[in-house]
Image: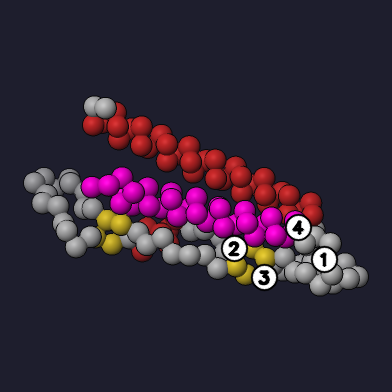
């Protein structure tokens, strides 16, 4: 079984893809911070619980010889859609992006991405150790 088929890894990969898509939207918001009439966009918050509920058992099932064995599952890595932000500050030109808020979101997004990549890397190392490699 490939490592990326394990539900934990699929969820982490989806989280990293979400962070990547969000980074692109936040960069657009920052780039258009002074564009008249521009309204910022952001992604719907990523939900690990939703990713777990989407996981399902593959058509190929493992034979369990002990009651404690875990079934093999996978998740669908769906694409993320942008949504308009609620702009509480709007400039006279109609721009609803606050540069300071966007930069805070960029920093938080970067920390989330680094946490996910660190967890992914450590989990792969743990599996390699368990396999004796």
Residue 120 sits inside the magenta stretch? no
Main secondary structure found in the magenta portion: helix
Disc 2 secondary structure class: strand
CA separation in Å, label 1 and label 2: 20 Å
- The residue that disc 1 covers is 35
**Mark with earlier residue (4, 2):** 4
Q: Are marks 1 and 3 in contact (CB under 8 Å)?
A: no
- The residue that disc 4 covers is 31
Mark 4 vs mark 2: in front: 4
Taking the view exactly as shown, the residue that stands out farthest to the right is: 92
CA separation in Å, label 1 and label 4: 8 Å
Bin the neighbour count of mark 2 within 10 Å (Cα to Cα): few under 14, some 14-19, many 20 and up. some
CA separation in Å, label 3 and label 4: 16 Å
What is the x, y in percent for residue 101?
Answer: 75, 54
**Mark with earlier residue (2, 3):** 2
Q: Is residue 94 above or below residue 5?
A: below
Mark 1 vs mark 3: in front: 1
């Amino acid at each position: 079984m490939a490592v990326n088929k394990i539900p934990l890894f699929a969820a982490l990969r989806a989280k990293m893809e979400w962070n990547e898509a969000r980074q692109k939207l936040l960069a657009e918001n920052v780039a258009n911070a002074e564009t008249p009439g521009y309204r910022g966009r952001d992604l719907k918050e990523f939900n690990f619980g939703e990713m777990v509920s989407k996981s399902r058992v593959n058509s190929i099932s493992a034979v369990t010889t002990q009651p404690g064995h875990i079934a093999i599952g996978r998740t669908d890595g769906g694409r993320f859609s942008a949504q308009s932000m609620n702009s509480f500050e709007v400039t006279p030109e109609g721009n609803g992006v606050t540069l300071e808020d966007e930069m805070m979101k960029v920093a938080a997004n970067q920390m989330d991405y680094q946490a996910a990549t660190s967890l992914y890397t450590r989990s792969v190392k743990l599996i390699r150790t368990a396999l004796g490699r």
